[in-house]
Image (cartoon, rainbow, N blue to C red):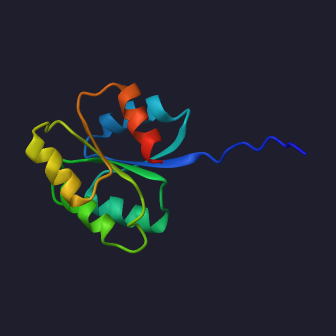
Amino acid sequence: MSSLIEPKTRNLLVVDDEYFNYEILKAALASKFDVSYADSGQSCLASAIANPPDIILLDVCMPGLDGYDTCRMLKHTPETKNIPVVMVSGLESELEKKAGFDAGCDAYVVKPFSMSVLLEQINTIV
């Protein structure tokens, strides 16, 4: 009694104030994920509550609510606290990485990154 069931496509939310970065990620990840986009921390929170993704790729440097604050809020909101967050940043110091993990992220990937490294991180935590 073996029936082939297609695995459900996982939803990935990209949060980045640069739309171009989303375009690159979507092109690279669309074969494995249903990729959606939020352009700010505020829209990420609203989107994650309304339609919870399986994982969030969160840019650190954004105007308004930055990635650290957004991650903290996601991890302290009952509806979103269990969604894995991968922080993506050009900031590579140990202090910045520590701030990311202190905020609750599940992984921290430094830009520029290779897609294989990013996918490895995503697959490790989803």
Residue under the point 52% across and 35% down: 30
Q: Where residue 54 sits in the image (x, y, percent)?
A: 49, 53
The residue at 33%/61% (across/down) is: 43
Give the residue at the far right of this rendering.
1
Using the image, determine if residue 22 lies above or below residue 106.
above
In this figure, what is the number of numbered marks?
0
Is 79 placed left or right of 70 in the picture? right
Left/right placement of residue 64 relative to residue 82 reads left
Quadrant for the N terminus in the image: top right
For residue 72, side relative to residue 28 (left or right): left
- Residue 3 % position (x, y): 85, 43
**In-front residue for pair 23/66:** 66
Camera-side residue: 60 or 22? Answer: 60
Which residue is pictured at 47% across the width and 40% down the height? 123
Residue 90: x %, y % from top left: 17, 36
Residue 70 in percent (x, y) is at 25, 61
Vertical side of 12 occupied by 109: above or below: above
**Viewer-side residue, 78 vs 102:** 102
Residue projecting furthest to the bottom: 78
User: Left or right of 48: which side holds 40?
Assistant: left
Q: Hey, which quadrant is residue 117 in on the image?
A: top left
What residue is rendered at 30% in x and 71% in y?
Answer: 76
Q: Is residue 115 above or below residue 38?
A: above
